[in-house]
Image: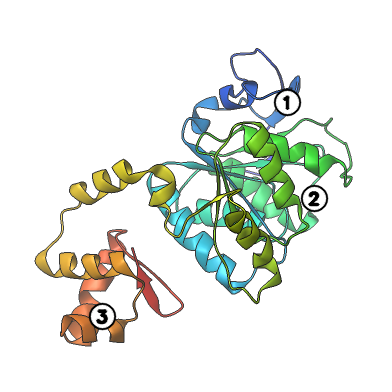
Amino acid sequence: MNYKDYKIQKIKLGDKNYPKNLSLIKNPPKFLFSRENPNKNIFKKSIAIVGSRSITRYGKDIIDRFVSFFASQKITTISGFMYGVDSEVHKKTIEYGGLTSAVFGCGLDVIYPPENEKLYSDILNSGGMIFSEYQNNAKPHLWKFPQRNRIVSGLSSFGVLVIEAALKSGSLLTVKIAKEQGKKVYAIPGPINSTVSEGTNFLIKEGLAQMVTDPSEILGKLLKENITTKLDLTKEEKLIYDELSKEELSLDELSAKLQKSIIELSTTLSLMSIKGLVRESGGKFYI
């Protein structure tokens, strides 16, 4: 279906379909517009993910790693539909069979950026939600995006994750808003010579965000333990899983550590990948 096939609904604060997480923040929007009746239950387990519009290969790899985990745990991702990190989060969530929600800084009959028209339909067709607090034909303006950010943060239950951000960026403004809302804030450390990691590194250095290097850290130690105990691993899979739990490794590195042939490991890794136990990115495997 095309996004235009979904009717726009107006939701009033206090209505049964108004997202509960958002209703709890200070000064929530009095009205929200969404395509079709929203399934407010998708925000019971949800996380907002924000970041730079100038996404790097590193940022894409991080999104792939974190979003695949969130999708496997049925955690809804929330972002702002813009270029870069926002769009990549929405696309990857859908690719991994998860639910994602986008918040527009314009009306729902306006696609901005225009290149995201297909993504608009994909989000709705996959069961996700799209929101705006602006009238249907409202044009995008710079001042509207900071307002939008309070909704992105407000919808989340687990808090806000920042993946790549410059020192002066909308992502750091979202962090300020999240703090005011009492939300937890997490940040991915990045290369010290990258301008789009200056913001995330600053947040970590100043204690404004918790540094995370693994998605399970956001959900807590208990969830990680629950996931591990539920795994039905063969002896060979457990050996590989234990090594990859420590660090990302290439096939050659695994072979050297485990003293096993590359052919044998490749077969086992392929099966583990099908089961969703491991992922591969940039020639390295990780949990």
Residue under label 1, please give it.
Answer: 32
Residue at disc 1, secondary structure: strand
Residue 96 in view of the camera: yes
x 43%, y 53%: residue: 215
Asked whether disc 2 touches disc 1, contact meaning CB atoms under 8 Å apart, the reply is no
Vertical side of 170 occupied by 242: above or below? below
Q: Residues within 10 Å of mark 1 (few under 14, many from 20)?
A: some
Nearest to N terminus: mark 2 or mark 1: 1
Can you tell which quarter of the image residue 113 is in?
Answer: bottom right
Residue under label 2, please give it.
Answer: 112
Coordinates of residue 151 in the picture (x, y in percent) = 69, 34
Can you tell which quarter of the image residue 266 is in?
Answer: bottom left
- 146 horizontally vs 13: left or right: right
- Type of the residue with mark 2: Tyr
Residue 7 in view of the camera: no
Residue under label 3, please give it.
Answer: 254
Q: How many marks?
A: 3
Residue at disc 3, secondary structure: helix
Can you tell which quarter of the image residue 156 is in?
Answer: top right
